[in-house]
Image: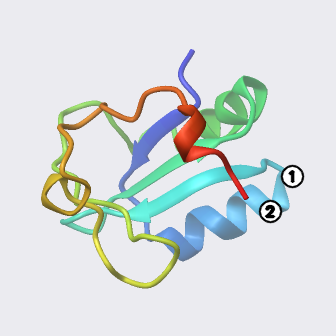
Amino acid sequence: MSRAMIIDVAQSHVTKTCATHEALISSIETLPGGYTRVVLQSGHAAAVIRRIYADKVVTAAVPRTPLSVAGRGVPLTQEMTGRPAGAFGPRTPDRKRK
């Protein structure tokens, strides 16, 4: 079962519910239309939250916007990277971390 889900509830409510049930969040974002996309750190936590929001989990496709880069509010786009989506392959010697 997927650790990601889209819920028809405000992000603040999802965050509080996850904290109450000790479900650790990997990623969370507000989508157009007021939906919340959340990715949990474990499948067990996802199952718990999915059960809690059973009637609020959205199964239809919902459009997303790019996540912010390092919290700066700058969207990461193909134009910025110069690479097509998914082109972030393995690190090459000239791209080592410092």
Q: Position of residue 50 (x, y in %)?
A: 58, 35
Of the 4 image quadrants, the one containing the N terminus is top right
Q: Amino acid at mark 1?
A: Glu
Which residue is painted at 43% across and 63% down in the image? 29
Which residue is painted at 52% across and 73% down in the image? 70
Q: Position of residue 22 (x, y in %)?
A: 86, 52
Q: Amino acid at mark 2?
A: Ala
- Residue in front for this viewpoint, 57 or 93: 93
- Where 74 falls versus 84 (above or below)? below
24 horizontally vs 40: left or right: right
Residue furthest to the front: 94
The image quarter in which residue 86 lies? top left
The image quarter in which residue 94 lies? top right
Q: Which mark is residue 68?
A: none
Colour scheme used in the picture?
Answer: rainbow
- Residue in front for this viewpoint, 67 or 32: 67
Tell me the element at label 2. Answer: helix
Q: Which residue is mark 2?
A: 19
Tell me the element at label 1. Answer: loop
Q: Position of residue 79 (x, y in %)?
A: 13, 59
Mark 2 surroundings within 10 Å by alpha-carbon count, few (fewer than 14), some (14 through 19), many (20 or more): few
- Cα separation, mark 1 vs mark 2, equals 5 Å
- Residue in front for this viewpoint, 97 or 63: 97
Mark 1 surroundings within 10 Å by alpha-carbon count, few (fewer than 14), some (14 through 19), many (20 or more): few
The answer to whether the residues at label 1 and label 2 have Cβ atoms under 8 Å apart is: yes
Of the 4 image quadrants, the one containing the C terminus is bottom right
Q: Which residue is mark 1?
A: 22
The image quarter in which residue 95 lies? top right
Q: Position of residue 20 (x, y in %)?
A: 83, 61
